[in-house]
Amino acid sequence: MASTHREVIVYSDGSGLNEQIGAAVVLYKDGTEQGVLGKHLAVRSNTPYLRPRLLGLSLVAKLIKTKVDFLMLTITMSGMRI
């Protein structure tokens, strides 16, 4: 059986300011951009730094689900502090 391993990298970023949050993600498969998602929301919250990161993670999951065929997926996150 031939190997179907493909390198998939997703970059994400999010921020919040003045009761507004936003996040964007970009997915690369084998070095080629495959998709971009972004979302902007007005939110009232006492956790302004947590919500953009959670929004970003939900966009990552959606992009992976729609752009990547996989049997097994390994996710590595760097720079993430929640």
Image (cartoon, rainbow, N blue to C red):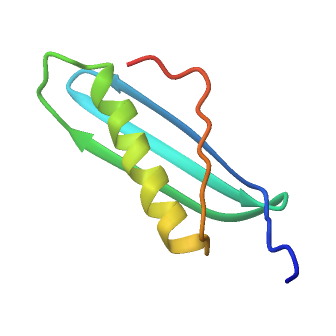
Tell me the residue at 28%/30% (across/down).
51
Question: Is 62 situated above or below 69?
Answer: above
Find residue 35 and report its horizontal and vertical position in percent.
62, 65
- The residue lying toward the viewer, choosing from 24 and 78, is 78
Tell me the residue at 65%/56% (across/down).
27
- The residue lying toward the viewer, choosing from 53 and 36, is 53
Give the quadrant of residue 49.
top left
Q: Residue furthest front?
A: 1
Residue 44 appears left or right of 53: left
Find residue 12 and report its horizontal and vertical position in percent.
55, 40
Question: Is 64 situated above or below 75?
Answer: below
> Image quadrant for the N terminus?
bottom right
Question: Is 43 situated above or below 27?
Answer: above
> Image quadrant for the C terminus?
top left
Question: Is 59 situated above or below 51?
Answer: below
Tell me the residue at 84%/57% (across/down).
31
Q: Residue furthest bottom?
A: 1
Find residue 5 and report its horizontal and vertical position in percent.
80, 66
